[in-house]
Image (cartoon, rainbow, N blue to C red):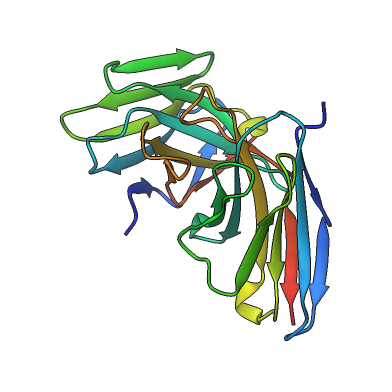
């Protein structure tokens, strides 16, 4: 039982390049989330998915797109990376029987130069 | 608008001391108040949580104190150890709000010095 996995762990992009961050969970959770973490700003929600086939914008969705490929996988895409998107990105999932417990992946550290 | 306000941003405590992190909220619809712990290079993980009808919850050296009338809650770490050095996030959840129901504070970076 791996929990929430994310790839890659580290990535360096040039401004304007695109990439997809991958996330998968093996806990059969319906809800999945993408956050970014920046110093002094805590965890900010980018997008979330309540179930397979549905996605919704969070607090900071501009510059990102997501795909809920199936129940296990939720990917985050940067179409044209900008230096302001330099951050640590976390994927999380939530079990249906808890309103407050989310399980987080290990994160992807992204640098855009 | 930050739903949960957290302070301080950083905290340095001597080994054996008490670490105290404070949070405040406005929305009375919140139904659980969890704390998450994040070690460097890792994702956050649930540490402890409290319901608003309870004034205190203790798990080992970690205690949440909850003041419903003041809309404030705090995390106390007794006998702080260097291994407690991490970033701590308070949060508030709202049942019935759909999947986007958990609101985090901005985090406190705790350093426990030997």
Q: Residue at x 68, y 57 (%)?
A: A67
A49 up-or-down from A58: above or below: above
Where is residue B52? Give x, y as percent.
29, 23
From the image, which quarter does the C terminus of chain A lie in? bottom right
- Front-most of B110 and A7? A7
Q: Does A83 sit above or below residue B5?
A: below
Kindly give the residue lying farthest to the bottom in the view shown.
Answer: A16
Q: Quadrant of residue B113?
A: top right
The answer to whether residue B44 shows anywhere in this view is no
Give coordinates of residue A64: x percent, y percent: 62, 69
Towards the viewer: A49 or A109:
A49
Q: Quadrant of residue B114?
A: top right
Q: Position of residue B71 (x, y in %)?
A: 22, 35
In this rendering, the count of numbered labels is 0
Residue B60: x percent and y percent? Answer: 54, 13
Query: At 82% from the left edge and 26% from the top edge, which residue is drawn?
Result: A1
Left or right: A82 with respect to B60? right
Occupied quadrant, residue B38 = top right
Residue B69: tell me if it is visible.
Answer: yes
Q: Residue at x 39, y 22 (%)?
A: B50
Q: Residue furthest front?
A: A53
From the viewer's perspective, is B29 left or right of B18? Answer: left
Instruction: Out of A25 and A53, give the one closest to the viewer.
Output: A53
Q: Is residue A66 above or below residue A107?
A: below
Q: Nearer the viewer, residue A69 or B10?
A: A69
Q: Is residue B9 left or right of residue B39?
A: left
């Amino acid at each position: 039982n791996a929990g929430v996995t994310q790839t890659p762990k580290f990535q360096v992009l040039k401004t304007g390049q695109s990439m997809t961050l991958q996330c998968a969970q093996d806990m059969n959770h319906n809800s999945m989330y993408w956050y970014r973490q920046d110093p002094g700003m805590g965890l900010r929600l980018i997008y979330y998915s309540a179930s397979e086939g549905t996605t919704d914008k969070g607090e900071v969705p501009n510059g990102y797109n997501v795909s809920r490929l199936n129940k296990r996988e939720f990917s985050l895409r940067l179409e044209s990376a900008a230096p302001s998107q330099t951050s640590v990105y976390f994927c999380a999932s939530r079990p249906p029987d808890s309103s407050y417990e989310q399980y987080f992946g290990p994160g992807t550290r992204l640098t855009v130069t | 608008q930050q739903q949960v306000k957290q302070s301080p941003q950083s905290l340095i405590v001597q080994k054996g001391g008490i670490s105290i992190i404070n949070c405040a909220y406005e929305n009375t619809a919140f139904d659980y108040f969890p704390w998450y712990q994040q070690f460097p290079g890792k994702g956050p993980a649930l540490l402890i949580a409290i319901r608003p009808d309870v004034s205190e919850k203790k798990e080992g050296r970690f205690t949440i104190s909850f003041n419903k009338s003041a809309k404030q809650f705090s995390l106390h770490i007794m006998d702080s150890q260097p291994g407690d050095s991490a970033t701590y996030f308070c949060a508030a959840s709202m049942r019935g709000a759909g999947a986007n129901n958990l609101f985090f504070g901005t985090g406190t970076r705790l350093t426990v010095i030997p």
